[in-house]
């Protein structure tokens, strides 16, 4: 009886609201962000700050759960503030800035410094535009509050680089499919520099707003041995190349007479997502089957979990990022719960495992032949 009363009391207590501090030099933006976020009953705005130079004091005095942060501000820019914040008072941050649309490089820097996610201000019509982004902003603030704040793992030298030459990888009929959401841009930025240039084609779904997938692909291209681009409908998928699903478009893999081609389209959202990791993984399971490798990285929700299971059932190798190294352990957790992951690995071990699986298949193929 005591237990029942205790449970009843706990259920009746009001849930603690998410405390948000807004940092932006525009009075209009601060007011609109306040209105948008406070429209959700689970969010409380504990303060607004027009100047990052004063923001640290407000963080210490108000003790918010999440910050929204602009980039360009007087006296101290958002990146400088973010760098100091992560050094002295690590906490979840969602970037809200014009620069996240105009200068994707600034966005990636903010994510690398420790920001959980970002929302792009509209180029015009701030009040109306930000209100349209309200659902996305609210969702990302709610995701951010559950994010794991940790030091980003350093890129380590992969084992294949300890040899004098690239590993010999048999890529005929093989393909690597990767899905990610919150925390994914940084995770992919850790993985790609560690892959050799002769890997089979890689197809990627990274949940990301419009205008960011092409610059993101360019960033991966610049930091890796691979050629990385935004996927185009009907494009042949070739060894040594990686293809990022365009924002708001599904990416699927189709077999052709010479191998595989990309199919890019605007079908219905799947689990609220377009592009959807499940859509990609399901197509790879049907088209590539046991010769595929599926990788599901950090992210909120369960997109990709069922698709990874479909891959594993074909005999494909499947990898899920572990909880400790995930910014948000949602998508990988769902996959692990379904039994979809053959391997559950920390981020820093995933590139080596991919290469070793490819090498193992190469050795098997050579023995059979």
Image (cartoon, grey):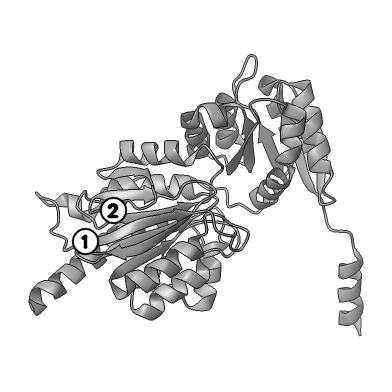
Residue position marked by numbered label 1 in the rendering: 258
Q: Quadrant of the C terminus?
A: bottom left
The percent position of residue 348, horizontal first and vertical second, equals 37, 54
**CB within 8 Å, label 1 to label 2:** yes
Location of residue 61 by image quarter: top right
Q: Image point 61% across, 18% down: which residue?
A: 76
Image side of residue 33 versus residue 72, left or right: right
Q: CA distance from mark 1 to mark 2?
A: 8 Å
Q: Residues within 10 Å of mark 2 (few under 14, many from 20)?
A: some
Residue 306 visible somewhere in the drawing: yes
Query: Outermost residue toward the top?
Result: 75
Q: Residue 45 placed where, x, y %?
A: 81, 39
The kind of secondary structure element at disc 2 is: strand
**Structural crowding at the residue carrying mark 1, measured as other residues with C-alpha within 10 Å and reported as few (<14), some (14–19) or many (≥20):** few
Along the line of sight, which residue is nearer the eye, 209 or 100?
209
Q: Residue under circle 2?
A: 236
Q: In this picture, is 254 found above or below 76?
A: below
């Amino acid at each position: 009886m005591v237990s029942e009363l205790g449970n009843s009391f706990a259920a009746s207590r009001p849930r603690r609201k998410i405390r948000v501090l807004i940092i932006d030099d525009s009075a209009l933006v601060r007011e609109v962000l306040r209105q948008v976020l406070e429209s959700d009953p689970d969010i409380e705005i504990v303060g607004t700050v027009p100047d990052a130079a004063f923001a640290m004091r407000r963080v210490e005095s108000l003790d918010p759960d999440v910050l929204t942060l602009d980039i360009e501000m007087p006296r101290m820019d958002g990146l400088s503030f973010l760098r100091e914040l992560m050094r002295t008072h690590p906490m979840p941050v969602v970037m809200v800035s014009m620069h996240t649309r105009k200068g994707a490089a600034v966005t990636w820097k903010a994510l690398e410094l420790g920001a959980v996610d970002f929302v792009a201000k509209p180029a015009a019509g701030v009040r109306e535009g930000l209100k349209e982004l309200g659902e996305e902003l609210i969702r990302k603030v709610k995701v951010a509050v559950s994010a794991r704040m940790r030091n980003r793992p350093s890129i380590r030298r992969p084992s294949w680089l300890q040899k004098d030459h690239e590993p010999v990888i048999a890529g005929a009929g093989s393909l690597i499919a990767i899905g990610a959401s919150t925390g994914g841009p940084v995770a992919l930025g850790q993985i790609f520099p560690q892959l050799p240039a002769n890997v089979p084609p890689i197809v990627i779904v990274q949940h990301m707003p419009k205008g960011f997938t092409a610059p993101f692909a360019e960033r991966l291209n610049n930091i890796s041995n691979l050629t990385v681009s935004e996927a185009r409908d009907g494009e042949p998928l070739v060894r040594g190349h990686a293809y990022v699903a365009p924002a708001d478009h599904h990416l699927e893999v189709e077999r052709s007479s010479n191998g595989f081609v990309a199919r890019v389209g605007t079908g219905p959202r799947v689990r609220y997502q377009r592009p959807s990791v499940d859509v990609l993984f399901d197509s790879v399971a049907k088209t590539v089957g046991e010769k595929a490798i599926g990788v599901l990285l950090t992210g909120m929700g369960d997109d990709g979990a069922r698709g990874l299971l479909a891959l594993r059932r074909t005999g494909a190798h499947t990898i899920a990022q572990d909880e400790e190294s995930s910014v948000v352990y949602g998508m990988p957790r769902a996959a692990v719960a379904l039994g979809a992951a053959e391997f559950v690995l920390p981020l820093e071990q995933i590139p080596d495992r991919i290469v070793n699986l490819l090498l193992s298949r190469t050795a098997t193929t050579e023995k059979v032949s």
